[in-house]
Amino acid sequence: MSNNQPKLTEGSIPRHLVRLAIPSSMGMIFNTLYNLCDYWFAGRLSSDALAGVSIASSVFFLLIAAGIGLQIGASAVIAPAVGANKKSEALRWSREVIGLSLVISAVVMLLGAVFTNSLVSLLGAEPHVAPYAITYIRYTLVAVPAFMVGFAAAGILMAFGDTKSNRNALAIGLILNILLNPLLMFGFGWGVAGLAIATGLIKVITAFYLLYKIGLVTESKPPKPAFTVKQWLPLVQQVLPASFNMLSVILGSFITVALIGRFGSQHIAGFSIGLRLEQLLLLPALGMNSAVMAIAGQNFGAGNIERIRQTYLTSLKLGLLMAAVSIPIMVFLSPLLMTLFTDNSEIVSTGTAYLRIDAIAFYAYVVLFLTTATLQSIKQPLFPMALGVARHLVVPVSINILLIVYLGFPMISVFYTLISVVLVSAISAHVFTSWRLQILQSHTAGYIHKGQKQTSLPALPGK
């Protein structure tokens, strides 16, 4: 592997966290700004176009949930091999990850072609809004292979301790989006279709860039896809829980959007913009999430359990500082931020309400990100998946359907339900993660005490 990537199994943990988290966070900031850029340009067309693109985003994120899980799973599988200096194994898994990404792409494109109209209708899009949403999704589906390969490549690079390349790819994407959107939307007169075509072109360019960077990091040729299906089990064991966890996030959000849509598409636009603005503030924590996965994953491969625990605790302290900065912004500046996208009073009011209420749970989100990263890194993906299904899907959806559909509560009750579930989930996740780290440390200490040479970790009991 390239000597430009410092070993994460030694050296200062806070320094590694900051070094990896900053470029990862910047990359995610560029990605969120990319989405907000689409919203801004859609708003220049009309409030109906803005509502349509907001609905389309919810549908498309639902379809590509597996890609985000693939990124997480790729890092979880490859990072231990990197930490144990097994270069050939890391490269082999990189090829398999790329192959799996193409298989997933075919499935997603098929599902999108079949279910797009039904999903848009389910979200309550009015007849004057639905065509915008369907147009955006149809054109974007063509670029799904580029999306999936990009997710896979970002996960591979993360495992090697490289978060800068994905940041650069997303920065390039943002710049190209700012240039292409007005050209294709207004210059060529393609409207919302121009937004989608720009996205497809950009994802193809950045996917090839990331594959090229993998070749540089690994000091080899860019990985070609491999389809050794019988060897995919360890990879799928990591990818499926991560994908189901992400799917529960997106599906829960999808149903939430559907419930909000009962009050009108303008409220969907307000919630969607507020959600993106909140994500922008949460991105430093998500960058820390990527850093924790890389550091903990490599140390898991090297058998350094205490170092994994210290990484988790240090990240929690840094996350608290992030919350101290972001919460006042959500509370006091949310009306100003919303008016950057539209002057529609319903959209602004809904987005402002969401940001102010969700500020209560900001640090809880940070804790959930970091516990999930830590558990994925020590090959414990099932608890985050189960908790994700409960907190994103089963509990809030059940409560909100009862409140909104059957009891006639106002829309704002949806937001209070969400923060209550997040707070309880964060406490549960922290307790579970601390317990699993303690068990792993005790189990490893006993393994070493018996005189075994520790070139890799023994299986964790109760996996």
Image (tube, helix red, strand yellow):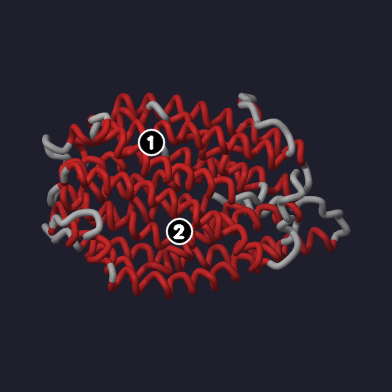
Q: Residues within 10 Å of mark 2 (few under 14, many from 20)?
A: many
The residue wearing badge 1 is 199
Q: Residues within 10 Å of mark 1 (few under 14, many from 20)?
A: many
| Residue at horizontal 42 percent and vertical 61 percent from the top | 282
| Residue type pointed to by label 2 | Leu
Q: Which type of secondary structure does the marked residue at label 2 adopt?
A: helix
Residue 360 in view in this figure: yes
Q: Which numbered mark, 1 or 2, is in the foreground of this view?
A: 1
Q: Position of residue 384 (x, y in %)?
A: 49, 54
Q: Position of residue 450 (x, y in %)?
A: 85, 60
| Mark 1 to mark 2 CA distance (whole Å) | 21 Å
The residue wearing badge 2 is 283
| Residue type pointed to by label 1 | Thr
| Residue at horizontal 27 percent and vertical 62 percent from the top | 337
Residue 230 horizontal side relative to residue 2, left or right = left
Residue 438 in view in this figure: no
The quarter of the picture where the N terminus appears is: top right
Q: Which type of secondary structure does the marked residue at label 1 adopt?
A: helix
| Residue at horizontal 38 percent and vertical 36 percent from the top | 199
